[in-house]
Image (tube, grey):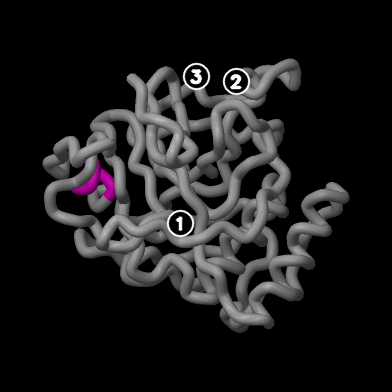
């Protein structure tokens, strides 16, 4: 399927999805972003500290976030022990409000629900930087996990888009470092509450919309992503 060259694409298991970035932020955001990018490129372990407005008492290794959507709430436990760079990046964007008002812009039943890059009018949010791909962390793309989207031909190209695995997608797992395809997609958390909401998202009616495919007919909006413990 040829989507043209206007937007980069995410291809998962032979299915191509639209890939975008996320919010531009203010000067403080850019300073924090630069710090995350530097740590990502150096491969250092990112723990607590720079992420703005973190919830008091947030578990530094296994923080939980509540994702409030128009179809209900999902609680995700993140794994900063196995994916420290990815979790740091996700919490940074969440705590600065970059995901508020974005949508799950493509949903493939029994496969993935992709979000975090476009608002309700399908306008993409600009990208700051790409982070290191931690898909080698041995976390698997199983049903109910959250993982980072990226460009299919560039290993370290994840920015802010993420997807939920709606089924066990073993073809997305890391198998080797020999190619971008084999490197896989980084899982960085697991749904611990609200799996039925994910199922509702999976069942949402979708339609093609111009160059877009599998777009929910009724937008599935992310109202907020908030650290809770």
Nearer the observer, 224 or 154: 154
Closer to the N terminus: mark 1 or mark 3? 1
Nearer the observer, 133 or 5: 5
Marks 1 and 3 close (CB-CB < 8 Å):
no
Crowding at mark 3 (Cα within 10 Å: few <14, some 14-19, many 20+) = some
Closer to the N terminus: mark 2 or mark 1? 1
**What range is drawn magenta here?**
198-202
| Horizontal side of residue 5 vs 52, given as left or right | left
Mark 2 and mark 1: Cα distance apart in space: 26 Å
| Horizontal side of residue 226 vs 137, given as left or right | left
Q: Which mark is residue 76?
A: 1
Residue 50 magenta-drawn? no
What secondary structure is marked by label 1?
A: strand
Residue 177: give x, y in percent of width and height. Answer: 75, 21
Residue 39: give x, y in percent of width and height. Answer: 82, 57
Quarter of image, res 185: top right
**Which residue is identified by label 3?**
171
What secondary structure is marked by label 3?
A: helix
| Horizontal side of residue 65 vs 27, given as left or right | left
């Amino acid at each position: 399927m040829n989507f043209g060259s206007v937007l980069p694409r995410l291809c998962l298991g032979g299915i191509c999805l639209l890939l975008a970035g996320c919010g531009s932020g203010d000067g403080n955001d850019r300073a924090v972003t630069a710090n995350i990018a530097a740590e990502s490129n150096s491969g250092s372990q990112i723990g607590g500290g720079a992420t703005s407005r973190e919830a008091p008492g947030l578990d530094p290794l296994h923080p939980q976030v509540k994702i409030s959507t128009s179809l209900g709430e999902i609680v995700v436990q993140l794994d900063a022990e196995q994916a420290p760079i990815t979790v740091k990046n996700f919490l940074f964007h969440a705590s600065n409000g970059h995901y508020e008002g974005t949508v799950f812009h493509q949903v493939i039943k029994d496969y993935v629900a992709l979000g975090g890059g476009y608002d309700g009018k399908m306008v993409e949010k600009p990208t700051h930087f790409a982070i290191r791909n931690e898909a080698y962390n041995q976390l698997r793309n199983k049903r109910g996990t959250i993982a980072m989207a990226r460009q299919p031909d560039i290993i370290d190209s994840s920015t802010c888009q993420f997807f939920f695995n709606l089924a066990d997608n073993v073809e997305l797992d890391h198998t080797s470092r020999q190619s971008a395809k084999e490197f896989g997609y980084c899982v960085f958390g697991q749904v611990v509450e609200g799996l039925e909401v994910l199922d509702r998202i999976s069942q949402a009616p979708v339609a093609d919309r111009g160059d877009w495919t599998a777009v929910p007919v009724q937008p599935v909006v992310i109202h907020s992503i908030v650290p809770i413990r």
